[in-house]
Amino acid sequence: MNDKIKVALLIPTYNQSDILNLILKAVCNQSLLPYEVLIAEDQINDENKKVIDAYRNKLNVIHCNQEDTGFYKSKILNKAIAESSADYIIQIDGDCIPHKNLVEDYSKFIQKGVYLYGTRVKIKQKYVKDVLAKKQINFSFFDKKIYKRFRNIRCFFLARQSRIQLEINTKLRGANCSFWREDAIKINGYNEDIKGWGREDTEFFARMQHIGIKNRRIKFAAIVYHLDHAENDKTNLNINHKVESQAKQGLNIIIKNGIDKYLS
């Protein structure tokens, strides 16, 4: 990676100050610190603010938040991306602890015309409280708290065997991905017609595919640890799925209800 490329780490969060604290601890432990840390908070919460302020002397933090009007991730992601002065954005979910080499790993694979997505190792739900209590951010291959443990192997020789593809992959998740900020702006960012849980990430990348942005799945590198939990409310999923289907068909690629309203 060109050292002049400014890389941001984007973290959406909602009402989980203990998890946010653990994630920011892991960010401070990165082998390569991000140029910016973008906190996209889908509410206004004093406890989250206290956590974020405690890390401002260690990290270059940009904190965006909005009134809690229900799950509105697309909107707060757009606001955070608009506020960023970075060139390139790594995005994880607010329930994912980054591996200590996450930023470094992504940085080694950055290239024009390609978005990337990494690997999720799951932390078993019954151990989540223990992980939070102990503020654990490192997990070995044999750690009893994780499953799908073969995803926890970091090997650059194997990671470099991955190929660039045009077709969207079913393994893609917004919980661990990266993209050029300018590419996000070209398609007018995340689609704010998507409200409630689900499909905002795959709809976003489907539209990227239709402007010629290819993808690369990084296995054996770019790892996050997902804190397993009960399923989210899927009330709006059918509606969101229809919006996603339009994007996959090449319809409504440059959306109307997107990031442009926040750009100066």
Image (cartoon, rainbow, N blue to C red):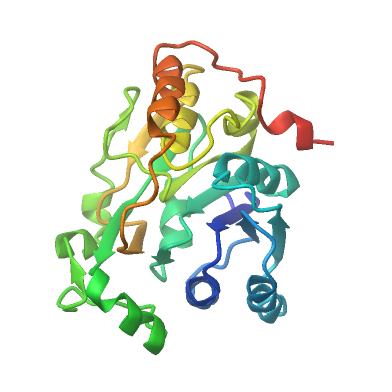
- Residue 59 as seen in the image, left or right of residue 132: right
Residue 1 showing in the rendered view: no
Judging depth in this view, the residue of 180 and 176 nearest the camera is: 176
Tell me where residue 200 appears, x and y as whole percent: 48, 35
Q: Residue at x 64, y 33 (%)?
A: 182
Taking the image as shown, residue 105 lies to the left or right of residue 254, namely: left
Q: Give the answer, above or below, for where 132 lies relative to 90.
A: below
Q: Quadrant of residue 147?
A: bottom left
Which residue lies at the image location 16% right of the left edge and 78% below the top edge?
A: 144
Please identify the residue farthest to the bottom as the structure is shown: 134
The residue depicted at 35 percent of the width and 23 percent of the height is 166
Q: Nearer the viewer, residue 97 or 49?
A: 49
Instruction: Report how many numbered discs are placed on residues in the image.
Output: 0
Question: In which quadrant of the rendered image does the C terminus lie?
Answer: top right
Using the image as rendered, state which of residue 130 and residue 58 is in the foreground.
Answer: 130
Q: Residue at x 59, y 45 (%)?
A: 88
The image quadrant of residue 228 is bottom left
Q: Position of residue 153 (x, y in %)?
A: 21, 64
Q: Is residue 157 above or below residue 130?
A: above
Please name whichever residue, 40 or 182, is drawn nearer the observer in this view of the structure: 40
Is residue 171 something that shows in the picture? yes
- The spot of residue 7 in percent (x, y) is 60, 53
Question: Which residue appears farthest toward the front when viewing the image?
Answer: 235
What percent of the width, then of the height, locates residue 38? 64, 57
